[in-house]
Amino acid sequence: MADDIDLAQERDARNLAEALAVQRTRAKATQHLTATGECLNPHCCEPFAANDEGRLFCGPGCEQDYRRLKRAA
């Protein structure tokens, strides 16, 4: 019975290590966007309120277009 428990604990530890490795890889691949004072979408043609320096996009449409372009790349 102790062998079964040891095997289960080893399997759990291995699964946890694999899950953490996947999470680390995903975190490294995630692009963190930085506000630049203008819309980050290169195809944006709408005016951008530059006085709001914390904004990344001029609207939800630009953000969706930007993310779609990044996924396709």
Image (cartoon, grey):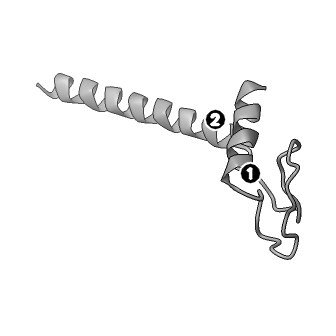
Q: Residue at x 88, y 49 (%)?
A: 45
Q: In the picture shown, does residue 14 fall above or below 42?
A: above
Q: Nearer the viewer, mark 1 or mark 2?
A: 1
Q: In the picture shown, does residue 55 fall above or below 41?
A: below
In the figure, residue 24 lies in which quadrant?
Answer: top right
Q: Secondary structure at mark 1?
A: loop
Q: In the picture, which quadrant includes the C terminus? A: top right
Q: Which numbered disc flags the more N-terminal residue, 1 or 2?
A: 2
Q: Residue at x 63, y 35 (%)?
A: 25
Q: In the picture shown, does residue 33 fall above or below 42?
A: below
Q: Give the residue pinned by disc 2.
A: 25
Residue 71 or residue 22, whichever sits in front = 71
Image x and y of residue 32, in percent: 74, 51
Identify residue type, mark 2: Thr
Image x and y of residue 46, in percent: 85, 55
How crowded pointer 2 is (Cα within 10 Å; few <14, some 14-19, many 20+) is rated as few
Residue 49 or residue 7, whichever sits in front = 49
Q: Give the residue pinned by disc 1.
A: 32
Image x and y of residue 38, in percent: 88, 60
In the figure, residue 30 lies in which quadrant?
Answer: top right
In the figure, residue 70 lies in which quadrant?
Answer: top right
Q: In the picture, which quadrant includes the N terminus? A: top left
72 lies left or right of 2 = right
Q: In the picture shown, does residue 9 fall above or below 30?
A: above
Disc 1 and disc 2: Cα gap in Å? 14 Å
Q: Residue at x 71, y 57 (%)?
A: 59
